[in-house]
Image (tube, grey):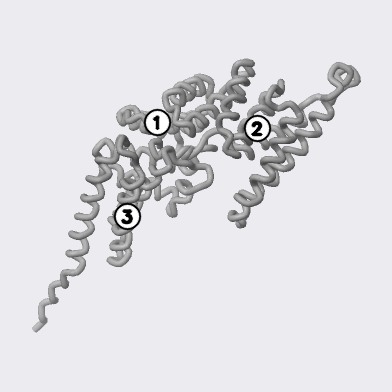
Amino acid sequence: MSQGPRLRRRPRSPRRARLPGVAALLALALAAAPLRAAPTVWSRALDPAADERAALISQADALLARYDRLRRSPLLERVDEIGPLWLREARTLYERAGAPTSRDPSVRLRYADILEHLGDVEGAVATLEGLLRAQPPAPSRADAWHALAVCYARLGRYTEEIKAYDEALALEPHAASRALLLANQAEAYMALGDITAAVEGYRAALSTLGSLDMFRYGVTTLWGLAVALDRSGDLEGAVEHIRLARTYDRNDQQINGAGWFYVPPYDEAWYAALGHWAAARSAELGAARAEAYLQAVAAWESYIARAPGNDHWVALAKARRAQCDREREQTMKRLRKPAPAAPLRR
């Protein structure tokens, strides 16, 4: 997803796993729950409302768990119908429990994630910025900066997004998580038109991944690098990286997954165009190749139609559309040409 289109990964986004979403934060909270000391008589005396807040959070977390199970079920069409109802109820419970100013960083992080999922990105930003001002422990600051970067991406605040990723990278020790941060940051550079920094960022992200991590984190990064290479003028390199991505994810499930979003939204068409173009070149059957070329041209036309006049890449998209159409015509001409007759044997 890259920003540019950016596919944002959310583990922020794409686009972007990016920050662990509601489900991951909930899992962390539930794992940590047994480690919390049971309230004592003295703690209850100091904070009589503590038990009530804990009960409200527990109810909300149960709703988040149901939401997560729904998202993982085959009934995906019901997510948009039912999911927001549970999220809104969870938000209400969190607010009754004082989540916006909670001293528990994980509660504030989950609350911010709920707001983002419900479309209140500004509210999520305010919550995360407030948490960072409170100077929580380093792991929570890393998660907060990561989540804040994703929110900045959704708001088109790319310069602030890049800085937020720098802050997260300074705190994140794990290679796979650093790869995700670097790839997301590369998408932000792409959105700003800094193609050199974008390519370097994607390559840096891939360099940190082992072979097993490639299946989880490398696929979308390879796609992002493919788009960046294409926009730098290297179409052949772009196609090769899409082919490599498909060795790990044959049906493009990760690039089309729920944890991925495009910034701007129309950037999705660029990814689709390159994907269809790569499929056309790889197709063995003439009919499949023809169909893939037509889909690629249609995707280029979609990008051109949806992109504003000041888009960094619309001129290149027009050139790519023409190039793809010429390649399609030449390929179809070769396919229509009858094969030479085999020589008669005497």
Residue 314 screen position, x and y as percent: 29, 41
- SS of the residue under disc 2: helix
Q: Residues within 10 Å of mark 1 (few under 14, many from 20)?
A: many
Residue at the spot of label 3:
298
Q: Is residue 229 visible?
A: no
Residue 199 screen position, x and y as percent: 33, 32
Q: Which residue is at a point 46% across and 23% down the rendered structure image?
A: 160
Q: Between residues 157 and 337, which one lies in front from this camera angle?
A: 157
Q: Is residue 334 above or below residue 274?
A: below
Residue at the spot of label 1:
186
**Residues marked 3 and 1 touching at CB (< 8 Å):** no
> Looking at the image, which residue sits at the far bottom?
346
The answer to whether residue 97 is left or right of residue 247 is right
Q: Quadrant of residue 52?
A: top right
Q: Quadrant of residue 76?
A: bottom right
**Residues marked 3 and 2 touching at CB (< 8 Å):** no
Q: Which residue is at a point 35% across and 38% down the rendered structure image?
A: 225
Q: Is residue 325 visible?
A: yes
Q: Is residue 74 above or below residue 184?
A: below
Q: Amino acid at mark 1?
A: Ala
Quadrant position of the N terminus in the picture: top left
> How far apart, in angstroms, are the residues tagged by discs 2 and 1?
26 Å
Q: Earlier in the sequence, mark 2 or mark 1?
A: 2
Residue 296 screen position, x and y as percent: 31, 54
Q: Between residues 300 and 240, which one lies in front from this camera angle?
A: 300
Q: Residues within 10 Å of mark 2 (few under 14, many from 20)?
A: many
> How far apart, in angstroms, are the residues tagged by discs 3 and 2?
40 Å
Residue 110, disc: 2
- SS of the residue under disc 1: helix
Q: Which residue is at a point 27% across and 35% down the rendered structure image?
A: 232
> How far apart, in angstroms, are the residues tagged by discs 3 and 1?
27 Å
The answer to whether residue 178 is left or right of residue 308 is right
